[in-house]
Image: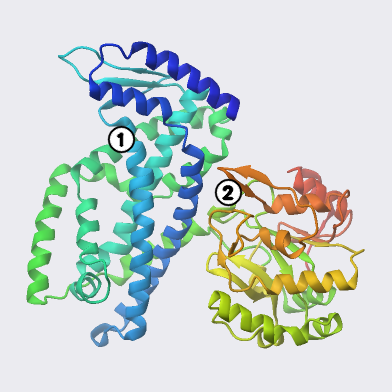
Amino acid sequence: MRQIRFKILMLLGGLLLSGCAGLSVKQQQLTQKHQSFYLDYETNFQDFHREIDISLQLRKRSIEFLKQEMLEGDAQYFDAHDIARIQAAVSEYSRNREVLLKQIAYRYRDLFEGVELIFTSKQPTELVVNRTIFNDKNKLFINPNDPLGREYIKVIKLGLAAALTLYDNFIIAIMPYHKNGHFRRSINENNIDDKKIIERISGNFRDLNNYRNTLKAVEFNDKVSRWELAHTESKLSKDKDNTYFNLLINGSYSNKKIKEITLWEHLAFRTKRFRSKVRDILFDIGAESLNSVSMAFGNTVGLISSRDGYLKNLPSSHIEKIETELLPGDILLEKTPFRLTDRFIPGHWGHVAIWVGSKEQLEALGVWKLLPQIYANARHRFNYQGPSFQTQIIEGKRVVEALRPGVQINTLKHFLDIDDMAVLRDKNVKKSALKRYVIRAFKQIGKEYDFNFDVETDTKIVCSELAFVAYDDYQWPTEKMAGRYTISPDHVGEKALGRGPFEPVMLYHDGKVVGKNVQLNFNRLMSADYGPVKFDLMPVE
């Protein structure tokens, strides 16, 4: 990738710098933007992925809250708990929106402002700056067959996906509040520090310039999509980032509807916005169809997760069988190809957790009596609000995992909303060392999720870092991305390929048990050689 980008830099230097003489200040600023547009792509992509995940979850929570309040009908009112939820959600939404809007959407929109986008497979990617005083229309020819063209396509899709997400958020999670005077007044005036946030977001949604630029990117993306359908084996079609953007763009409600919205309808929107202010003064409380909100909720959930995992509905007897075979310190890997976030994670596995064991196992290990103090530290350091660790273990919660809300302890049944699972174990570990590893796993509970995926942070943690932190004297593989050292679930899996201290002792694939050749089939999954694995699969009994 670095070599490709060095070539892009050289190419852009040749295309742009050599022609800067005689250009206006505005044209020189344009060429400078195009010289460096890709330099912060990796950082922006990491930030984008993090904020998209947060955005979808916030949208889901917003719709759930609105549905519940609407079901109350005439008895609808906000109690102290409701107000606290509104304050927290609006604060987080405002922060999330700032990143998606200004850092991502505007960053790449400005790149193509005043530039005609021309998709072509016949000439090389090139920015043509018009030098005449009679025509200031600049042209950008983008060819998907060359590296520079693919970079341009990805940043256009990155900016478009951010813009469409913001449009969807407004339509699905903000517009119902804007239409309902009771909700709007409570959010705008009564309960948050950021006054008039709904009005500000609504004004941005109706901004004609934003609409024109988004429509421009949508129309360009349509041309790219048609080309990709005809060239499924191309480098662009096989690019993981490109596939991720396609999922978001094609799953967007706004992507389908934005081309149907006329400029006249946008002007009418502004009139309605003015009338809504008058209705606020008169306390004329509006209403939104519960059916339409439910439909939007279903679309959002479908974008987050398209179905349940194949292992979700395992018989209780089989779950109990798994639990009896698990030992404290076992590392659990899982695969959820039906979730949007899984598409972004490199390699086969998408999540890591640690099994800490039952009360009897923890007593035998000498950990049980230490849990009250570890729990007290979690409350003090991380403001952890869950029940005591001993209580949760007795209730059957024995899987420590880092999820978006933070590190928590869950039941195996909760964990099993997945398709694939591998259990990794170091059979030669000493009891004293295992005790320390399990204690270190418990000490992570309550930490925030590390959306920067940085193994060098101590106060936040991502799922695969659990193994990295708990088994602290093992040498784990890492990778430097966007200036940070990260560890992926597949990095954890590398320690169980037959050369490291761990080995797979249990394996499931596509909801079925891998009945034999566990080590061989684990290695096959790690190398994405899925075909032969199916011959060793057995149905769950």
In the rendering, at what x and y percent does residue 60 appear?
A: 42, 66
Measuring 87% from the left and 73% from the top, which residue is drawn there?
432
The secondary structure type at the circle numbered 1 is: helix
Q: CA distance from mark 2 to mark 1?
A: 28 Å
In the image, which disc is placed on residue 110? 1
Q: Quadrant of the C terminus?
A: bottom right
Seen from the viewer's position, the closer of residues 317 and 124 is 124
Measuring 59% from the left and 29% from the top, which residue is drawn there?
2
In the image, which disc is placed on residue 153? none
- Residue 327 seen in this snapshot: no
Seen from the viewer's position, the closer of residues 288 and 392 is 392
256 relative position to 200: left or right: right
Seen from the viewer's position, the closer of residues 171 and 139 is 139
Which quadrant of the figure has residue 13?
Answer: top left
Measuring 33% from the left and 73% from the top, which residue is drawn there?
87
- Residue 39 seen in this snapshot: yes
Circle 1 packing at 10 Å, graded few (<14), some (14-19), many (20+), is: some
Ranked by sequence position, the earlier of labels 2 and 1 is 1
* Nearest-to-viewer mark from 2 and 1: 1
| Relative to 345, residue 229 above or below | above
Seen from the viewer's position, the closer of residues 382 and 155 is 382
In the rendering, at what x and y percent does residue 360 appear?
A: 82, 85
292 relative position to 419: left or right: left
Task: Check disc 2 and report the residue beneath it.
Answer: 343
49 relative position to 492: left or right: left
The secondary structure type at the circle numbered 2 is: helix
| Relative to 116, residue 205 above or below | below
In the rendering, at what x and y percent does residue 303 appear?
A: 47, 56
In the rendering, at what x and y percent does residue 317 appear?
A: 77, 78
| Amino acid under disc 1 | Asp
Q: Quadrant of the N terminus?
A: top right
